[in-house]
Amino acid sequence: MFDFNIGARRPVTGEARAKRLADAQELVQRTLAQHGLDGASSPSQLSNADGLTRLLQRLLPVGESPTRATPVPERLDLPAGAQFLSGRHQGKCGSRAYRTCVPASADAGATAIVMMLHGCTQTPEDFAIGTGMNALAERHGFVVLYPEQSRGANAQTCWNWFSPNDQTRDRGEPEILAGMAREAMSHYDVPPDRCFVAGLSAGAAMAVILGTTYPDVFAAAGVHSGLPYRSARDVASAFAAMAGQRSEQSAEPSHPGIRTIVFHGSADSTVHVSNGDGIARNADRNAPSPSLQTTRTGQVNGRTCSVTTSTGPDGRDHLEHWVIDGLGHAWSGGQPGGSYTDPQGPDASAEMIRFFFEFKD
């Protein structure tokens, strides 16, 4: 799911072009070595940065059978009376388009805001279909925001979680997305303790960033197949982080974190399962203490799951960490009409909403 926009769109000449090609060759050599490949695609054969982009895309393991992209219907199958609105938020750091699902059950007032951040190559419509979140919105009366990454910001529509400018409060994409959430909270009269963020893959990595940098905006985060905060500072370290190799520049947040539910598949060959472990450790380390940690195992539709829960002194679960045996890089329990989904389950969408709203089993 992770495809990076390596090559710049602007033409370059002279020394700048030579430096770009040299840097590209060095990155390709390191990437080839990381993936245990020989020189079948030699960097000397690359004529420009676009060629590098194509090579790196081929190196990424994005073709797992249950997660292959599928055509997205032009129209969503919305619950009766629901609206799927289009909008654009302008922040001081830029603007992004978004879709909003307003369920009929929210007519008397929205119970919450849930921001859903899609993965690379996905769209808001695709993500809404795959996660089935609109049906849950109708059931529980919350509004869903689906921000859309622009191709101008990333050619593969990845949220730029690996860019230092997009890992800090009041800068880059975090500023835009937090502003979008604030705008929705004001419009639908929803308080900060009822505003949540969730995402898949690159979107999950950005959800971690938002939870870390804007704990005053988001009360809880749902992280599916994502990466820890500041686990990368550039494209090369992003590849290393995805492979489970900890970056020297990575850093854990040093302030209290928000409640977090983590999902990761043991068979994820795109983002190593150790990244989910790292997210869970950070969330537990920065939660209220002392905490009581319990682990249970069970089966859902024949698939073994391990769930670790950390409960704080106030009796609230501040962390829930799911490791799902046999799940690849896909939204667990997702709908087959969307891309990067595995319908077998468990249902990550329903479990996230339960955790956000603190419903009891």
Image (cartoon, rainbow, N blue to C red):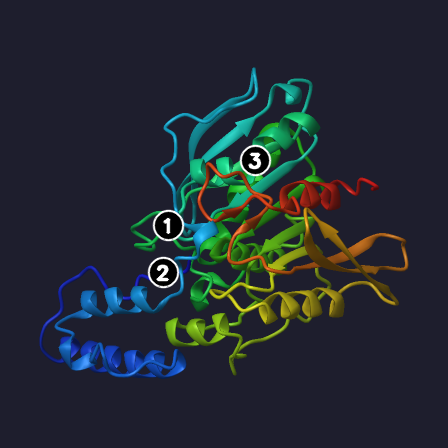
Residue nearer the viewer, 253 or 75 = 75
Residue 58's tag is none
Amino acid beneath label 1 = Thr
Say what secondary structure mark 1 lies in.
loop
Residue 232 is situated, as x and y percent measured from the top left of the image, at 48, 72
Q: Residue furthest left?
A: 14
Q: Residue furthest top?
A: 81
Q: Are marks 3 and 1 in contact (CB under 8 Å)?
A: no
Viewport quadrant of the N terminus: bottom left
Say what secondary structure mark 3 lies in.
loop
Reading the chain from its start, which is encountered first: label 3 or label 2?
2
Residue 13 occupies quadrant = bottom left
**Residue 258, visible in the rendered structure:** no
Residue 132's tag is 3
User: In the figure, is residue 238 to the left or right of 150?
Assistant: right
What's the residue at 23%, 70% (across, down)? Answer: 52
Residue 63 is situated, as x and y percent measured from the top left of the image, at 39, 57
Residue nearer the viewer, 28 or 163 = 28
Mark 1, residue position = 121
Amino acid beneath label 2 = Asp
Mark 2, residue position = 3
Distance from Cα at disc 3 to Cα at disc 2: 24 Å
Q: Are marks 3 and 2 in contact (CB under 8 Å)?
A: no
Give the vertical position of 159 relative to 48 (above or below): above
What's the residue at 49%, 39% (across, down)? Answer: 336
Picture mark count: 3
Distance from Cα at disc 1 to Cα at disc 2: 8 Å
Viewport quadrant of the C terminus: top right
